[in-house]
Image (tube, rainbow, N blue to C red):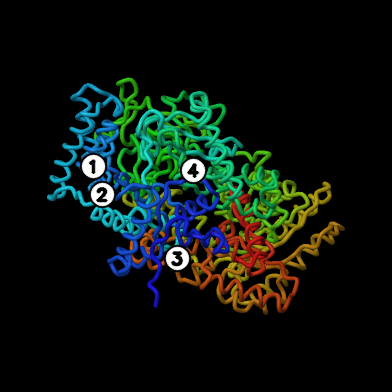
Amino acid sequence: MSEERIVYMFDEVDPSKFKTTSELKEFFGGKGAGLANMTSLGLPIPYGFVIPCKHSLHYAEHHEMPSALKDQVKESIAKLEKKSGYVFGDINKPLLLSVRSGAPVSMPGMMDTVLNLGMSKAIAEKMAESNERFAWDSWRRFIMSYSDIVKETGREPYDEIMEDYKEKKGKKLDIELSAAEMKELGDLYLIEYKKLLSTEFPEDPWVQLFGAINAVFVSWDSERAVAYRKMNKIPNYGTAVNVMRMVFGNLNDDSGTGVLFTRSPMDGEKKIMGEFLINAQGEDVVAGVRTPMSMDDLQKERPEIVEEIFGLANKLEDHYKDMQDCEFTVENKKLFFLQTRVGKRTASAAVKIAIDMMDEQYIDEKTAVLRVAPEKIEELLHKRISPTERKSPIVKGFNASPGAVFGKAVFDCGRAIEMKKAGEKVILVRKETKPEDFPGMIASIGILTSRGGKTCHAAVVARGIGLPAIVGAGDLEIDEEAGIAKVSGEVVFKEGSIISIDGLAGNVYVGEVDVVDPEITAEFQRYLELCDKYRKLGVRTNADTPQMASDAIKNGAEGIGLCRTERMFNAEERLPKVVDMIVAESLEEREKALNVLLPLQKGDFKGIFKTMNGKPVTVRLLDPPLHEFLPDYKTMLIEFTELRVKGDHGDRFKELEFMIRKYEELKEENAMLGHRGVRLGNTNPEIYKMQARALIEALIESQNDGIDVHLEIMLPLVSHVNEFTRLVSILKPLASEIMASANFTPKNTIKWGTMIEIPRAALTSNEIAKHAEFFSFGTNDLTQMTYGFSRDDVESKFLMKYIDEIEPPIMKDNPFEHLDPNGVGKLVAISVKDGRSTRPNLKVGVCGETGGDPDSILLYHKYGLNYVSCSPFRVPVARVAAAHAAILDEQGKL
Ligand code: PEP
Ligand code: MG
């Protein structure tokens, strides 16, 4: 039996053997697939080999390398030697390598790279004969990166040595250091290495190479990689290892290194954008330590090289039919591409690129829809700083990721996590960020750094996760240890101070700024309309006021899926009137109080009907338990006790005595499972009767005013069909009577339906559908009752621990946020099917929190719902998610 092939030279991979780029990437990782593709497209890349992802999983399981790996790596090095003419470990013609990880899904900054591998001091000495400074610079970099990545010491001890050394020599920039100084630094680094690790630096290139491969395998399961995967729901693919011949951007001034995007990742403009550092290696660009020059500036200085770079970049974009993010190096005027991958982008860039590429006939409409992730849409809906805000920014940086936020400044990642746990909103302020800062970054609502450019770690990560960020605010002097930030020597803010950042403009403010809600641009509108063309699910909104309704319409809502009438009762001036209704001691008294509420509710409904003219409006009759509207029990009790102690038995004492008694009468141990919804409706029909009257009178007056009302009346919390039929038998004749006495015929039939939010209702929906004309799933209560999770308590008590803290996690997702396909999802599916078995044209929607969640929307499409309903702000997200669902379904990928 022939031995399994573990190592592939780049030109031994045949991309055409894989059905899709994703399959190629899953096997060889993103970088490996990119390198193989670039090889087959004839792009100049440094030769090398790739170890497929599955071997890192083998390593994770067995804690050792696959047995044939070493031999095959040795054979591959021999091939590399033969092709390049360099020899591994040779003093005269040393083959130097880069070793990089490469997961199937790009995980920016998460995995590690070792450069200049294969060097020894003797090799450096020899290389120094022809290019002294370059040789010693490469040597000291290698010691640092090997120690940092392979031996996990971090690079700080070496950075400190560098900083101290430069200070001693009176120099500011690394580039000002002479060859002899670089050599001396190398010696200092070797001493530091021994001090940190109690062993000599390994000079044997094979020890170095296998050490580095090992480190790549280990890094797949590092804390930050695991956190990133968890947050982005990336499966446990494993990572590939890419080993390539080093090409040197730091050879001389005819060398350099750069990164580019084939279109702007900020706004999608069709223009190659990039940054280039002369006489530098890749890590210098990404780390953002030195400020690079733009492609435009490079074009002025080296037009021929820019022309070549652009030509190859365009070739790549043309091949992939998507915006590419490439790394390249120029070694002594010769250009090499080191990496290409689909570029991360802001949501507005994603939308523009999708629409432009469709117009350019690169991609079809459906591909254009799928190019923008529904979750990303939220970024476009981010708040911005109000145009009327007069506050002046204290400093400006690069606008790395959009969104305006204010929060407490925090200078340390650990503190950011702590403060988030304590419920604070924090903005992480750092000189720069490194991959290990990731957990602190995701605990923050915004990122601010004083160093770096638009492609530095902080910028790439923040854009990827949609976190507002400003990087490279160079005028800010950040002292992370002391937790202070200064401008021109003056302290401007400290840890805990409120600051604001505007990631769209790059402005930093002290204090809180006025932020406004975003608008939908013409471009975004076109994309959303394209989504509307393909989606099958309707999108409605949950709105209780005309303002919310009109916001939702602007965002494309096609109707109201849930108007919670109790929210109309909550207005401050109304509450006393509601209380009168609740505490009434007789039916007569209650009806009197209800009559006071009637015109108010009617007015509300008229406002909503007017805004929703022509669109369906589902109004839910009162749902929560009554005692929720009464004043706080504890506060009443304290005041009552104080009065009693004082011997004050006046009016207030009597009032409190009465209210406390009423509260105790109404109070329930499990109020959420108690006397609410149709249960209250059945025992006290006068309340629903008032609401039905208000609705019908509003309908009559609105229609008479020329408004087209499509009214759907929803009865909440049905568990037994009789709860529904009894109430409809009371309310429907009442509605008819009111209309008859006004000599009124509604233009559109009034529909009577229910919310399915109790498991029993879901299981008996064939019965309920005989009487109910529509269903809407209330997944908040349905989740509460299916899991037996108190929706008001579990998140703060244990649910987040189940998801984020306990290892391995007990649950992957919060079922109140993402529909659980094995629990509530099953009930929904059964209920839709059974309901339609009785009433084939039964209209079914969902209005719980999951109604606006993209993952859940995929399932709702699958279960055949008619519409989803969500908060006004999430309506565009739902439109996009629904289009994704329809297209994926059509492609058999749902
Ligand atoms: C639900 O239970 O999902 C629902 C939408 O109703 P509420 O949140 O008002 O209980
Ligand atoms: Mg509910």
Question: Which of the marked residues, 3 or 2, is nearer the chain's N terminus?
Answer: 2
Question: Which of the marked residues, 4 or 3, is nearer the chain's N terminus?
Answer: 4
Contact check, label 1 and label 4, Cβ < 8 Å: no
**How far separated are the C-alphas under marks 3 and 2?**
65 Å
Looking at the rendered image, the disc whose residue lies closer to the viewer, 4 or 3, is 4
Residue 714, labelled with which disc? none
On the rendered structure, is 60 left or right of 545?
left
Residue under numbered circle 3: 790
Classify mark 1: helix, strand or loop: helix
Q: Amino acid at mark 1?
A: Ile
Where is residue 128 shown, x and y percent of the image? 25, 34
Residue 123, labelled with which disc? 1
| Nearer to the camera, 310 or 710 | 310
Residue under numbered circle 2: 89
Classify mark 2: helix, strand or loop: loop
The crowding category of the residue bearing disc 4, from other C-alpha atoms within 10 Å (few below 14, some 14 to 19, many at least 20), is: many
Above or below, 422 against 867 in this view is above
The crowding category of the residue bearing disc 2, from other C-alpha atoms within 10 Å (few below 14, some 14 to 19, many at least 20), is: many
Contact check, label 4 and label 3, Cβ < 8 Å: no
Question: Which of the marked residues, 3 or 1, is nearer the chain's N terminus?
Answer: 1
Question: Which of the marked residues, 1 or 4, is nearer the chain's N terminus?
Answer: 1
The crowding category of the residue bearing disc 3, from other C-alpha atoms within 10 Å (few below 14, some 14 to 19, many at least 20), is: some
| Nearer to the camera, 735 or 802 | 802
Residue 116 figure quarter: top left
Q: Amino acid at mark 3?
A: Ser
Where is residue 119 shown, x and y percent of the image? 25, 45
**How far separated are the C-alphas under marks 2 and 4?**
30 Å
Q: Which residue sits at x=50%, y=44%? A: 325
| Nearer to the camera, 109 or 242 | 242
Where is residue 159 shown, x and y percent of the image? 24, 36
